[in-house]
Image: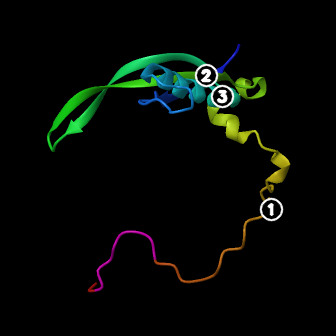
Amino acid sequence: MQRFEFKVIPAPRRGEKARGVKTTEERFALALTNLMNDLGAEGWDYVRADSLPCEERAGFTSTKTTVQNVLVFRRAIPSAAAEAPASSRLLLQDPAATPAPRLGPADAPVAGTAPALGPAKLDAE
């Protein structure tokens, strides 16, 4: 079974200036192209764009809802890591690198005066 990891990033809000790119649409397309090519070079595949509501504070006591535009990318997790649950991926280290616990008799107790155990006694008795 193929497993994936996902990355969600904010969509660009402005275009990028470049030689020969004049209109707002062309500049915005250039910003998206550069972003997608950068993430593609890292192995991320574009999945989709979403517009999601986000609740923000407005003043001390009120809130307002805004819309956030995000881009969703995914990449395949290598098969060796895909077989292990996410919580145990960190445990895939070489066990020989960690020292083994010392086994043997417990240290001898140190002689001393310990307080008496049992119900409290009054000194006046």
Which residue occupies the foreground of this view, 66 or 37? 37
Q: From the viewer's perspective, is the residue at label 3 or at label 1 nearer?
A: 3
Alpha carbon separation for disc pair 3 and 2: 18 Å
- Secondary structure at numbered mark 1: loop
Picture coordinates of residue 111, whole percent (x, y): 63, 82
Picture coordinates of residue 72, whole percent (x, y): 52, 22
Alpha carbon separation for disc pair 2 and 1: 50 Å
Point out the stretch of residues depicted in magenta. 116-123
Question: Which circle marks residue 72 in the picture?
Answer: none
Residue furthest to the right:
96
Question: Which circle marks residue 85 in the picture?
Answer: 3
- At horizontal 26% and vertical 34% (from top left) the residue drawn is 56
Q: Is residue 18 above or below residue 102?
A: above
Question: Which circle marks residue 104 in the picture?
Answer: 1
Q: Is residue 79 above or below residue 122?
A: above
| 2 or 1: tag closer to the N-terminus | 2
Q: Coloured how?
A: rainbow
Picture coordinates of residue 17, whole percent (x, y): 50, 33
Which residue is tagged 2? Answer: 74
Picture coordinates of residue 28, whole percent (x, y): 47, 24
Q: Is any atom of residue 4 visible in this view?
A: yes
- At horizontal 55% and vertical 32% (from top left) the residue drawn is 18
Q: Residues within 10 Å of mark 1 (few under 14, many from 20)?
A: few
Q: Viewed as shown, does residue 70 lie left or right of 47?
A: left
**Rendered image quadrant of residue 55:** top left
| 3 or 1: tag closer to the N-terminus | 3
- Secondary structure at numbered mark 2: strand
Which residue occupies the foreground of this view, 104 or 49? 49
Q: Is any atom of residue 6 visible in this view?
A: no
Kind of residue sitting beneath label 1: Gly
**Rendered image quadrant of residue 78:** top right
